[in-house]
Image (cartoon, grey):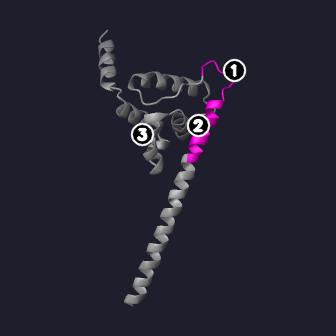
Amino acid sequence: MVDELVLLLHALLMRHRALSIENSQLMEQLRLLVCERATLLRQVRPPSCPVPFPETFNGESSRLPEFIVQTASYMLVNENRFCNDAMKVAFLISLLTGEAEEWVVPYIEMDSPILGDYRAFLDEMKQCFGWDDDEEDDDDDEDDDY
């Protein structure tokens, strides 16, 4: 009985190791596909689009508001291409470079649910790259007084 359990445990550990290796390989393939998609998206620019294709974002905090406005505007006029949150997040990821790209890799590696939630992804970007919503909320409160 003990020998059978040892053999079963060994088989399970071997299967776990094989699945871990396969998972690592799949994650690497996913990373390569995301990079390839980013390259392709940078090349795709609809000729009749009234909003220019957004610039990349490298993690520079002062550029985050501009990046969010550019990407939101672009997705709004191309709403048929960005029909769900996962597509919107994938588009944002395709435009990340440098520090911002390094920041998103762990989310991709762990297949975080945030990758399918556009608002949560933006909130996480704002928190990481220094966007203080409190200031914006304070300004809104003042405007409400008038």
Q: Quadrant of the C terminus?
A: top left
The magenta-colored residue range is: 32-52
In terms of secondary structure, where does tag 3 sit? helix
Nearest the camera: 31 or 131? 31
Q: In this figure, which residue is indicated by the disc labeled 1? A: 48
Query: Label 3, label 1: how many angstroms apart (C-alpha)?
Result: 33 Å
Q: Percent from the top left, x then y, of residue 135?
A: 30, 21
Which residue: 40% across, 84% down? 5
**Which structural element holds mark 2?**
helix
What kind of residue is marked 1? Answer: Ser
Label disc, if present, on residue 103 of the rendered structure: 3
Q: Is residue 16 above or below residue 59?
A: below
Residues packed near mark 3 inside 10 Å, few (<14), some (14 to 19) or many (20 plus):
some
Q: Amino acid at mark 2?
A: Ala
In the foreground, 57 or 12: 57
In this view, the residue farthest toward the top is 146
Dot 1 falls on a residue whose secondary structure is loop
Q: Which residue is mark 2?
A: 38
Question: Residue 118: x, y in percent?
Answer: 47, 36
Nearest the viewer among 25 and 117 is 25
In magenta segment, residue 20: no
The answer to which image quadrant residue 126 occupies is top left
The amino acid at mark 3 is Trp
Mark 2: few/some/many CA within 10 Å (<14, 14-19, 20+): some
